[in-house]
Amino acid sequence: MNDLGSGAGVNDARHLRLDTFVRLRWLALTGQSAAVLGAQFGLGLRLPFGWCFLVIAVSSWLNLALRIRFPASYRLSDDSAALLLAFDIVQLAALLFLTGGLQNPFSLLFLAPVLISATALPPERTLALGMLAIGLATLLALVHRPLPWFADGRIELPFLYVSGVWTAILLGTAFTGVYAWRVAEEARQLAQALAATELVLAREQHLSQLDGLAAAAAHELGTPLGTIMVVAKELDRQLGPTATQAVADDLKLLRDQVDRCRGILSKLTSLDEDEGFLQTLSFGHLIEELVAPQRALGIAVEVSKSGEGPEPSCRRNPGVTFGLANILDNAVDFAESRVLVEARWTLDRVSLEFRDDGPGFPSEVLLRAGEPYVTTRSPGPSTSPDTVGSGLGLGLFIAKTLIERSGAQLSLSNASTPGMKGAVARISWARHIFERGTLANNFVAPNSMWPLPERGTAPI
C-alpha cells in the first residue's frame, strides 16, 4: 500500500478520494460492531465474540494506517481502490463465515463494495470484484459456522432458501453493478462535455473581445502612427546632409518600425479574411516570411532546415502565420544575441522549433504558459526597464490558439541541454494536415461563434 495513487491519474475526478473511502469504511465498521454487540448482549445470541471483533479490528487498523500515512485529499488509483474494496469483501466474508454464512441476513452487504466500484472504477475491475463476491458467497453457502441462535434452540435453514439468497446476491451484484456503472458513466461524460464546452466558449469569448480591441486599436493608432511618419520625414528633410550617420540611421529605423506597426495592425484586422491568402508556399518560404522582418533588429536569426523527401508545401493561413510570427517576436525580444529556427520534416510529420539564448520561462509560470493574462517571460537584456511587467500575457495565448486550430501540437519549455539556456517553442503537424489545401472550409476566424474544428482538421 505504499503507492496508492497512480502517477498520471491522481487528479482525475473519477478517482475516489481517500477521505471519502475511509469515512465509508468507518461507517461500515460501526454498523458491524453494533450488529455484533446487539446480537451478543442485546439478543443474547451466542457468537464467537472474540473472533468477530478481531476481524473488525484488522479493518480498523488498516483504516488508521491509511489516515496516518496519506492526506485526506489524496485520491486512490484504480488498482489501489480495487484492492481495498477486495479487502472489504474478504473481511465481510470472514464475518459471515463466523455468523452463519448466507443464512445471515447481512449477507446482502456483498453488494456494497461492488456498487462503489461500479460508480468509480473501470468495468473490468468491477467485474473482478463481482466475481470475488460471488465466489466467496458460493463458498459460504457450503462452508460456514452455524447461525447463532438462542441457547435453548438451534435453527438450520433449508438449502433451497440458501440457494435463493445466493441467487439474489448473484443477480443483485450483476444488476446493480451494471446500472450504477451506466449512470455514473453518463454523468462523467456529461461533466466532461460541459467542461469542454465551457473551455471552447471561454476561448472564443476571449478571442472575440480581442478581435474588437484589435479593430479599435487599428483605428485609434492609425492617426498617431501617421503623425510619427510625417515627423520622421520632416526631420529627415530638415537635417538633410547635416545629419550625422547615427541620426540618419535612427530616422530610417523609426520609419521602418512605423511601417511594421501598420502591417501588424492590418493583419490583426484581417484575420477573418481568407480571400487573397490561398497561394501555395513552401515550408522554407513560410519560414523566410517569418524571419525577414526580424533581421534588422540586431539579433542574429539563424535558420536550419533538413528533412526526408521533398520539402512540404502548404496553403497560406493568416492566423497561423500571425501565431508563428508572435512566437518568433517573443524569442527575438528576449534573446541575448541569437535565435535559432529549426525546420524539420519527415514523410509523416512537419515540425518547427524556435530557440533563444535568453532567460527562458520562469518556473512558476511555465506550466501555465499560453493561458490568457499570464505574463510568461522574464525580461531580457534587450527589454527596456520601462516595459517590465507591462505585458498582459495575451500574445502567446492568441498565438497558441491560432496554431492549435490548424491541427498542430505546441509545447513550451526551457532548454534542457547542459550548458545551454533560453526558451524553446516546438510546433509539430502531421504532414498530411500541414499540406491539406481546404483553407476556406476549415479555418475559423477569431471572431467566429462557430465551434472550433476538431484537432487535425484545419490546414496550415
Image (cartoon, grey):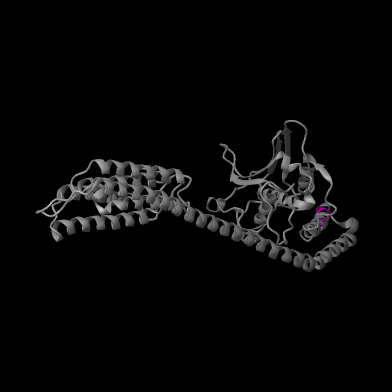
Residue 300 included in the magenta stretch of the image: no
Let me know if residue 391 appears in the view: no
How many numbered marks appear?
Answer: 0
Q: Of all residues shown, which one is farthest toward the top?
A: 309
* Most foreground residue, 340 or 138: 138
The answer to whether 205 appears left or right of 363 in the picture is: right
In percent of width and height, residue 181 lies at 46, 52
Split into 4 quadrants, where in the image is the N terminus? top left
**Residue at left 34%, top 45%?**
133
**Residue at left 83%, top 49%?**
278
Magenta residues: mostly which secondary structure?
helix
Let me know if residue 42 appears in the view: yes
Classify 40 as above or below 146. Answer: below
* Most foreground residue, 434 or 141: 141
In percent of width and height, residue 328 lies at 70, 48
**Residue at left 85%, top 53%?**
276
Specify start and end residues of the magenta stretch as a single range.
246-251
The answer to whether 83 appears left or right of 43 in the picture is: right
* Most foreground residue, 293 or 315: 315
In percent of width and height, residue 13 lies at 47, 54
